Amino acid sequence: MRNANVPILPGQTPYWEGSVDAKELKRLLKTPTKRAFSLGRTQVRLLFQIVFPYWENYLKAIAHPITDASILNLRFGWAAGPLPKCQSPTRTVQVVMDSHTSIDLTSEKILFQIVLCRHNVPRQCLIIHEGRGRFEIVIRDQECAGAPH
């Protein structure tokens, strides 16, 4: 269970929270991705708007003293096709993070599936954290407010 005083993402409220389904996580980790994702404005935006704020808030929510916390690996990729739940073709980025804290015995996987609008602005995010839970968040961004998509 999570600390309700620390948000999952700053300024965003999950519209769905639940426990991790190991089969779903395994299936999503095997989702084919295109490796052609270079460090551009979109990737930097995702890192600073979603990935790093999530990691920071996760560390703030831990009640036990932490002596060491690290991101061991960070992999970006474009999902090779539309997600099964989506009716229309979308641009979806998958970010997989291997993380470690001093209170964990092994590293944990954190999966981010981020749906982008045609302007490469994040619209929806699925976060599955092995040791924490599953969160679905609709991201509201003023840059796309009222813009046709």
Image (tube, helix red, strand yellow):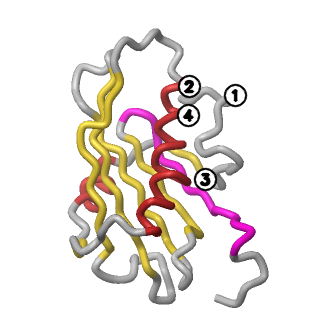
> How many other residues sit within 10 Å of disc 3, few (<14), some (14-19) or many (≥20)?
few
Is disc 4 placed on a helix, strand or loop? helix
Hey, what amino acid is under mark 3? Trp
Name the spot of residue 11 as percent of width and height, x first. 71, 48
Task: Please give the residue where the numbered disc 3 appears in the rendered image.
Answer: 16
Instruction: Give the Cα distance between marks 3 and 4.
Output: 18 Å
Instruction: Give the Cα distance between marks 4 and 1.
Output: 10 Å
Q: Are marks 4 and 1 in contact (CB under 8 Å)?
A: no
Q: Which residues are magenta?
A: 131-143
State which quarter of the image contains the C terminus.
bottom right
Hey, what amino acid is under mark 2? Ala
Q: Which of pointers 3 and 1 indicates the residue nearer the eye?
A: 1
Hey, what amino acid is under mark 4? Asn
Task: Please give the residue where the numbered disc 2 appears in the rendered image.
Answer: 61
Is disc 2 placed on a helix, strand or loop? helix
Q: Is residue 133 inside the magenta stretch? A: yes
Task: Please give the residue where the numbered disc 4 appears in the rendered image.
Answer: 57
Q: Residue at x 46, y 76 (%)?
A: 85
First-in-chain label (2 vs 3): 3
Q: Are marks 1 and 2 in contact (CB under 8 Å)?
A: yes
Q: Is residue 147 left or right of residue 14?
A: right
First-in-chain label (1 vs 2): 1
